[in-house]
Image (cartoon, rainbow, N blue to C red):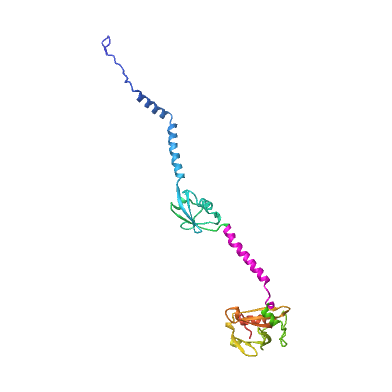
Amino acid sequence: MATQDGGDEVMMETEAKPKGAEFAESIHKKTLSDPGDATTQDSKLSNGDEAQDKQETVDLKIIWNKNKYDLKIPVNSTGAQLKEQIHSLTGLPPAMQKVMYKGLLPEDKMLRDIKITSGAKIMVVGSTINDVLAVNTPKEVIQQEVKAEENKKEPLCRQKQHRKVLDKGKPDDIMPAIKGAKERLPTVPLSGMFNKSGGKVRLTFKLEQDQLWIGTKERTEKVPMGSIKNVVSEPIEDHEDYHMMAFQLGPTEASQYWVYWVPVQFVDAIKDTVLGKWQYF
């Protein structure tokens, strides 16, 4: 535009901005001036990622006592926490658990560190307290019953099969007994005793032949000492200075050969000689 003095007048013109652009610009400025809103939005995104991490789980197959259990557990759980979960499933206390996964599972490490993944089979070994009591209690009861039965067991000398021999009384030619003494086997046969049929019997120990000769009026049986399985004895009631003694000649007690009125001082020597503990020459 020309002025009156002929100069040109410079005019500053400002373009009018659309209202929509002005609104967007104001929002942008507000964001720059107040960054807290952006931080809040970023924080919300970050918290969402952490929650997703915490919810990461693995599906395990727990095998205990021929039973199988399905368990979903966070992957950042420790071995100790896994034991607590197993306890809730099985009733097996953690202290009584042996948890196996490629060896004994460490309690202080996370499942993620042990590289346990979904589908893994976890073997558990252990017994509940009730199981232990259920097993031990009957055993203890049985032991007590057996002990009571043994205490009530009738002495051999009172049993009918032996009583019929003992009731005949001491043989007339019985060898004298020395109560409380232990002696070596005599060089002569032990005689004056009864066998199960009530007949007279004598015992001769042939050490040089490693034989026991059992002699009766009818015959003499020569028994290798190595074939005698066992020797048992018991004091005769009211005559404790004499014993009744059995030589087991076969595999069962049915093969026992009974001898009655054995002088007590020779009992240990007979057992030790026949069973080979030591010899008397």
Residue 69 locus on image (x, y percent): 48, 54
- At x 39% / y 27%, what residue is drawn? 27
> In the drawing, does residue 141 fall left or right of residue 71?
right
Q: Is residue 182 visible?
A: no
Residue 268 locus on image (x, y percent): 66, 80
- At x 61% / y 62%, what residue is drawn? 137
Quarter-of-image position of residue 3: top left
Q: Is residue 19 visible?
A: yes
Residue 78 locus on image (x, y percent): 50, 50
> In the drawing, does residue 230 fall left or right of residue 125?
right
Main structural element of the magenta stretch: helix, strand or loop? helix
Outermost residue toward the right in this view: 238
Q: Is residue 54 above or below residue 68?
A: above
Q: Judge by depth and name the residue closer to the eye, 109 or 98.
A: 98
Q: Is residue 181 magenta?
A: no
Residue 86 locus on image (x, y percent): 51, 53
- At x 59% / y 60%, what residue is drawn? 134
Identify the magenta region: 130-158
